[in-house]
Amino acid sequence: MLPDAEALYDSLAARDGRFDGQAFVCVTTTGIFCRLTCPARTPLQRNVIFRATADDCRAAGFRACKRCKPEAVRPVPLLPEALR
């Protein structure tokens, strides 16, 4: 299960690596999915959908970003809140 969308978007906007590999951002206006730490311009919040894996993003019809190469990231299990 993914963290809430607000926390994920805040992480995306700050390029915070806390959720890197645990979630991916799909940009509906471009059809591209990225890592949360991608150096590309931050999309508007209304234009993003968060998915748990790169496979989920591809299944939804998005293609991988050529800048951050999200397909190369191995899935990282979510840590319990107490361990963060």
Image (spheres, rainbow, N blue to C red):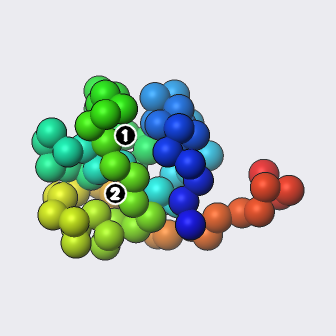
Q: Where is residue 8 in the image (x, y as percent from the top left)?
A: 52, 43
For the point 29% across and 50% down, the residue is 26
For the point 13% across and 42% down, the residue is 30
Relative horizontal placement of residue 75, taking residue 39 as reference (left or right):
right
The mark that comes first in sequence, 1 or 2, is: 1
Name the quadrant of the N terminus.
Answer: bottom right
For the point 53% across and 32% down, the residue is 10
Q: Where is residue 44 in the image (x, y as percent from the top left)?
A: 31, 28
Tell whether label 2 touches label 1 (CB within 8 Å).
Answer: yes
Distance Cα–Cα, label 1 vs label 2: 9 Å
Q: What residue type is labelled 1?
A: Cys
Label 1 packing within 10 angstroms: few (<14), some (14-19), many (20+) = many
Relative horizontal placement of residue 42, taking residue 8 as reference (left or right):
left
The numbered dot on residue 38 is: 1
- The quarter holding residue 28 reads top left
The numbered dot on residue 70 is: 2
For the point 47% across and 57% down, the residue is 23
Is residue 43 shown above or below 68?
above
The numbered dot on residue 13 is: none
Closest to the observer, 5 or 35: 5
